[in-house]
Image (cartoon, helix red, strand yellow):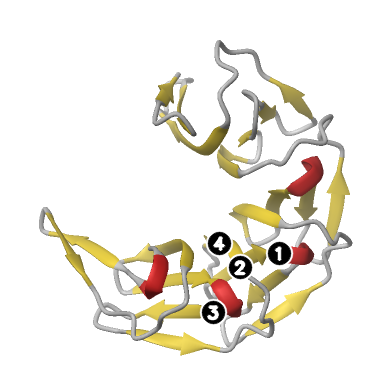
C-alpha cells in the first residue's frame, strides 16, 4: 500500500505490483484469504481485491481512513475501518456503513478479536471498545497518540505510541508495560506460540524492530 494508489502482492516468493486503478493514498490492508482483501485510504477510499482485480466500494465517508481489521464470522465476513475525526465504518457483508464513535479524535488503528469484540486507538490516548452493538471509550492512562493495536486473543492485546508507550490488555484493564526504549513506537504485531508465550514485534520511528 502507498501513495498514488500503489498496491503490491507477494505470491510464489515474489513481490509484484497490482494496479489498483485509483490514485488515492492507501494506508492499510487486511484480509482473510488471498482472494478476499480490503484496503482503504484518503478521501474515504475503500477497495476490494478478489484475487484478480481491485474494485471500488462506497464507504459512506470522505474522511481519511487509516486503520482496518477484517473479522471472521461463521455466516458472513465483517470488517471495520477507522480514520480522521473519529470516523468508524463497518462492512456488514453487503455494504459499508458509518458507526457512531463518540469521539472526534483521529483514529489510527483497529483490531478485532471477533465480530463482537473490537478495539480502536488514536489521537489523545483514545481507546474505544466495540461489543457488537456500539463503541464506548475505555481509560488508557495516557493522552499520547496511540498508533497501532494488535492482539492474539481477548486477553492478550497490545497498543503502541510515542516516547516508548506500550500498553497491554489482560482481558480486564489496560496497563503500561515496561521495556527499554523511549523511541516512538509506530506498529505492533503479536503471535501466540501456543506454548504459553506471546512473541511481540514492534516497529519504531528510528528504523528499529523490537522483539520480545
Task: State the SS at label 1.
Answer: helix
Does the CB distance between marks 3 and 2 fall below 8 Å? yes
Label 2 belongs to which residue?
65
* CA–CA distance in space, label 3 to label 2: 7 Å
Label 1 belongs to which residue?
84
First along the sequence among labels 3 and 2? 3
Does the CB distance between marks 2 and 4 fall below 8 Å? yes
Q: Name the residue rendered at 42%, 64% in the picture.
A: 31
Q: Quadrant of residue 148?
A: top right
Q: Nearer the viewer, mark 4 or mark 1?
A: 1
Q: Quadrant of residue 114?
A: bottom right
At which x and y percent is residue 4?
Answer: 39, 73
Q: Name the residue rendered at 59%, 78% in the picture.
A: 43
Task: State the SS at label 3.
Answer: loop
First along the sequence among labels 4 and 1? 4
| Residue 200 appears in view | yes
Front-lying residue, 72 or 25: 25
* CA–CA distance in space, label 3 to label 1: 13 Å
Amino acid at each position: 500500500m502507498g501513495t498514488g494508489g500503489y498496491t503490491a502482492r507477494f505470491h510464489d516468493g515474489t513481490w509484484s505490483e497490482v494496479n489498483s486503478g485509483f490514485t488515492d493514498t492507501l494506508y492499510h490492508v487486511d484480509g482473510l484469504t488471498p482472494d478476499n482483501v480490503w484496503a482503504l485510504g484518503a478521501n474515504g477510499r475503500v477497495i476490494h481485491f478478489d484475487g484478480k482485480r481491485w474494485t471500488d466500494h462506497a464507504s459512506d465517508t470522505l474522511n481519511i481512513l487509516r486503520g482496518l481489521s477484517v473479522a471472521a464470522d461463521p455466516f458472513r465476513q465483517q470488517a471495520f475501518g477507522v480514520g480522521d475525526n473519529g470516523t468508524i465504518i463497518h462492512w456488514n457483508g453487503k455494504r459499508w456503513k458509518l458507526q457512531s464513535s463518540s469521539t472526534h479524535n483521529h483514529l489510527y488503528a483497529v483490531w478485532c478479536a471477533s465480530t463482537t469484540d473490537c478495539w480502536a486507538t488514536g489521537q489523545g490516548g483514545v481507546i474505544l471498545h466495540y461489543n457488537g452493538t456500539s463503541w464506548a471509550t475505555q481509560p488508557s492512562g495516557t493522552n499520547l497518540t496511540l498508533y497501532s493495536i494488535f492482539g492474539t486473543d481477548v486477553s492478550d492485546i497490545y497498543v503502541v505510541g510515542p516516547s516508548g508507550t506500550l500498553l497491554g490488555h489482560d482481558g480486564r484493564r489496560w496497563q503500561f508495560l515496561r521495556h527499554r526504549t523511549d523511541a516512538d513506537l509506530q506498529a505492533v504485531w503479536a503471535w501466540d506460540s501456543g506454548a504459553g508465550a506471546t512473541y511481540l514485534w514492534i516497529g519504531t520511528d528510528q528504523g528499529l524492530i523490537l522483539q520480545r
